[in-house]
């Protein structure tokens, strides 16, 4: 969703979304995430300065999903750190739960990484992974089903 109404989400909606986020699975149950909710005008303006799209300014709230990669699980055989996967899962829990309670969201990763670190005054161990604007949708025309590959293109049976 890239168009939002001014009205803030209700407390019950946010509680539901955050509870669904809390229950997200993570590798070895490390839960290496930290969510920062930019609710104030000041905090949102700072984040909007890190991703220059006018539509983001409409969002009444922005959740920033951060990860502590030292806390995340690293697979021994090849050294793959799973922090970004964990961050992706909690992000999608947030997005799906938000949709369920009538809110819209959008994944935003194309932000200025260092600018977000600075805007949020993040400690060294935390990395911002996704910004999630969240609010009442002002555009209901989107139909993802028509913009996806067919099942046959993405599934292979053996
Ligand atoms: C990892 C990831 C990063 C994304 N980053 C951005 C972004 O920076 N800006 C943006 O407008 N949309 C971003 N998106 C949203 C995608 O562009 C969107 O999900 C995709 O185009 C499909 O659109 P639809 O879900 O509305 O059909 C991102 C999505 C994912 C999963």
Image (cartoon, rainbow, N blue to C red):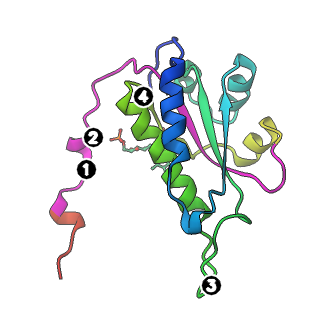
Whether the residue under disc 2 has CB within 8 Å of ligand 1: yes
Residue stretch rendered in magenta on the structure: 122-151
Q: Does 127 appear in magenta?
A: yes
Question: What residue would you read off at disc 3?
Answer: 76
Say whether residue 44 is left or right of residue 132.
right
Residue 148: give its label: 1
Residue 23: give its label: none
**Disc 2 to disc 3: CB gap under 8 Å:** no
Say whether residue 121 is left or right of residue 6.
right
Query: What residue is rendered at 30% in x and 23% in y?
Result: 140
- Circle 3 sits in a helix, a strand or a loop, which is it? loop
Q: Position of residue 92 (x, y in %)?
A: 45, 46
Q: What residue occupies the far bottom of the structure in this picture?
A: 77
First reached walking from the N terminus: tag 3 or tag 4? 3
**Disc 2 to disc 1: CB gap under 8 Å:** yes
Whether the residue under disc 3 has CB within 8 Å of ligand 1: no
Residue 153 vertical placement versus 106 (above, below): below
Q: Residues within 10 Å of mark 2 (few under 14, many from 20)?
A: few
Question: What residue would you read off at disc 2?
Answer: 144
Which circle, 2 or 3, is nearer the viewer? 3
The C terminus lies in quadrant: bottom left
């Amino acid at each position: 969703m890239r168009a939002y109404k001014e009205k803030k989400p209700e407390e019950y909606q946010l509680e539901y979304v955050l509870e669904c986020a809390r229950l997200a699975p993570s590798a070895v149950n490390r839960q290496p995430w930290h969510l920062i909710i930019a609710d104030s005008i000041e905090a949102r303006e700072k984040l909007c300065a890190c991703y220059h799209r006018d539509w983001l300014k409409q969002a009444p709230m922005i959740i920033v999903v951060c990860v502590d990669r030292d806390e995340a699980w690293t697979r021994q055989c090849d050294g793959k750190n799973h922090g970004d996967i964990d961050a992706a899962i909690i992000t999608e829990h947030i997005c799906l739960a938000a949709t369920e309670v009538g809110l819209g969201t959008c994944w935003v990763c194309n932000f200025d990484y260092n600018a977000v670190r600075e805007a949020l005054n993040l400690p060294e161990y935390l990395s911002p992974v996704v910004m999630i604007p969240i609010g009442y949708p002002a555009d209901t025309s989107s139909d993802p089903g028509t913009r996806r590959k067919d099942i046959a293109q993405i599934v292979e049976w053996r």
